[in-house]
Image (cartoon, grey):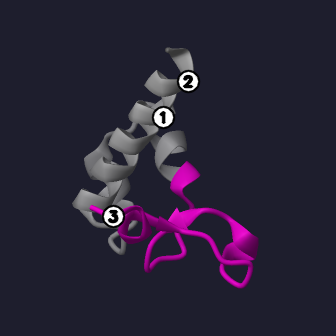
Amino acid sequence: MKKEQIMSQNPRVMHGALVFAGTRVPVETLIHYLVSGDSLDTFLADFPTVSHEQAVAYLEMTLEYANARVA
C-alpha cells in the first residue's frame, strides 16, 4: 500500500491530525487501543471506516520507522 492510501494529513480534517486516509480517525487512536490491551479486531469493529489493510500497513510502517531510528 502506498503511504497516501494508509494515512493523510490536512489542516481542514481533524485540525490537521494524521488520520487514516479517507476517514476522520486519527492514527494515534490505533496505538492507544493497542497500548490499552485492546485487539486490532476491537479497533476495527469500533472504527469500521478504517480497513484492516490500512491498520496493518500503518503498524508495519511504524515498525520500520522505529527500527530505522534504532539502527
Sequence-first disc among 2 and 3: 3
| Closer-to-camera residue (22/46) | 22
Task: Please identify the quarter of the rendering in which residue 52 is found.
Answer: bottom left
Sequence-first disc among 1 and 3: 3
| Closer-to-camera residue (17/70) | 70
Task: Please identify the quarter of the rendering in which residue 60 is found.
Answer: top left
State whether residue 36 appears in this view.
Answer: no
Q: Residue shown at 39%/64% (left/top)?
A: 6
Check disc 1 and report its element: helix, strand or loop.
Answer: helix
Residue 17 in the image: state x and y as whole percent.
68, 65
Q: Does the magenta portion include 25?
A: yes
> Circle 2 sits on which residue?
69
Would you call the spot at circle 1 few (<14 residues within 10 Å), some (14-19), or many (20 or more)?
A: few
Q: Does the magenta portion include 50?
A: no
Which label is found at residue 37? Answer: none
Q: Is residue 19 above or below residue 32?
A: below
Give the CA distance from mark 1 to mark 3.
15 Å
Q: Residue shown at 43%/80% (left/top)?
A: 22
Q: Residue shown at 31%/51% (left/top)?
A: 57
> Circle 3 sits on which residue?
2
> Circle 1 sits on which residue?
65
